[in-house]
Every structure is written in structure tokens, then in C-alpha cells.
Amino acid sequence: MRRSGQWITSEAGAGEVFLRGGEVQMSIPLASSACYHNAQISDYHALEPRFGNRPPLRLSLLARGEGAIRGTAGFGFWNQVFVPGRRRFRLPQAIWFFFGSPANDIALARGVPGHGWKAATINARGWRFYGLLPFAPLGFLAMRSKRLYQRLWPAGQRAIGVCEAPLDSALLQDFHRYAIDWHADRVLFSVDDEVVLRSERGLNSALGFIAWVDNQYAIVTPQGRFGWGLLDCPEAQKLILRDIEITGLA
């Protein structure tokens, strides 16, 4: 882990981060699933995270991918769910653009696939989530009924603050302008100045900026399916960012 200018870079396995002027290249070359590979930048130190981003603010950047990404990639704000070397686990909070390749199945928004390119929010630290937590085992069983899932999961989705919109994965083939306008009571996501998601599930906690590409997958579903693993990278995969700006909003 090292700091370069305003960013702290992290490299795991074969992951590499290159900073050239206003461009950031996060790359994983040909690699196997024998270990975790990650290339990442952030504005906080992973071992002692202190998050300095609060609403109202705007994140704006240009982004494109390269190669067939196998794993996850994205950029935005989150609360560093895991701290390396510690057993502590934080319930997730995130406002970001997120990509998960097939094998990922994070299907927490009704009607949105559990993998692919998406704009998304999650806030599992609200009072609604804590209120439902004691009933989680029964809830997982109930969600296996399609009828009960359609009827009851909207309440569960609200409880964990999930709001998502699927995006065309072809967007990653070329540079596009992505923006997140984060207010305490709402979040607007846009691509090339067109709003793609309006979330009324605001989040007023401090979060850290992160951008990454890795080779992991995760499975989290309302039906109680959970899993995690690593994928082979048969070709080089990259996430390339330019003109990253985090500015205050009036």
C-alpha cells in the first residue's frame, strides 16, 4: 500500500496500479484463482480507515474497462466492510457504480440481476434493518416462495437501503462520464449527464472513496444463499479512470 498524490493505492496478488498525470489504470494481468488479485485506489488507509466524505457532494469521473473483467470492479463511496487483519465486520454502506461478472449473484434489488453493471446504494445500518434482523432465518425460508418474495421483499429491500438500476455493460468498452450527486436525503446517479437512478434512500454517514478491479465473486440473496470465491483471469483486465473530481454541492 502506498500513497501517490491524493490517492492511497493498494495492490494484492498480481494487481497493479499505474498513475499517469490525470489517469489511473488499475490492472490485473493473466492470473489464476489460486489467490486474490486486486488493484485499488482510495482516499483512506485500509488499516486505519478515517472517512472524510459526507453529503452534499459530487463525484465525477471518466471511466472505461479493458478486457473481459472476471470478478468485480467499480467506484464510489463505501464504509470498508472488512479491515485487513481484524475480525471486525461492518454492516455495508455504499453509494457506487458496481460491476460483477457472472458467478456474482448479489440479488438484493427486486427485478435487477445479481450481476452486471449497475448504479447502486445500500445502507444496512439503519433502524429498519436492525428491526428485521431477529426474523432473518424465517425470512430466508419465506423468500423461497415466489409469491411471498414478490409480496414481502420490498420491505426487506427498504430495510437494507438497497436501490439499484442496471446499466448496459457495453458502456465499459469506451470512456463515459459518470457522476454521483450525494445528498443527505437522496442520491442521483448519471451517465453522460443523463440520470440513470434516483434513490430517495439517502445516507448521511461518512464514507471513503474507492475504485478497484479484482477477481472475486460474492453470492448474497434474499433466499439465504451466501458464498464467496475467486475466479481465473485468462486475459488482462483493467479499470481506467480519468479526471476524478470530488466537489461540494450547494
Image (cartoon, rainbow, N blue to C red):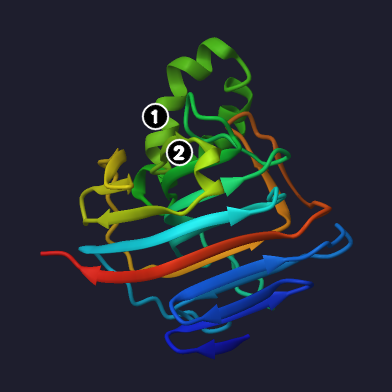
The mark nearer the N terminus, 1 or 2, is 2
- Quarter of the image that includes the C terminus: bottom left
Q: Which residue is mark 1?
A: 155
Asked if labels 2 and 1 touch by Cβ distance under 8 angstroms, the answer is yes
Q: Which residue is mark 2?
A: 132
Which one is nearer the viewer's eye here, 69 or 222?
69
Q: Residues within 10 Å of mark 2 (few under 14, many from 20)?
A: some
Q: Secondary structure at mark 1?
A: helix
Q: Position of residue 172 (x, y in %)?
A: 54, 48
Residue 77 lies, with reference to residue 192, above or below; the image says below
Q: Position of residue 217 (x, y in %)?
A: 70, 49
Mark number for residue 127? none
Kind of residue at disc 2: Leu
Which one is nearer the viewer's eye here, 22 or 167?
22
Residue 193 located left or right of residue 1: left
Which one is nearer the viewer's eye here, 202 or 171?
171
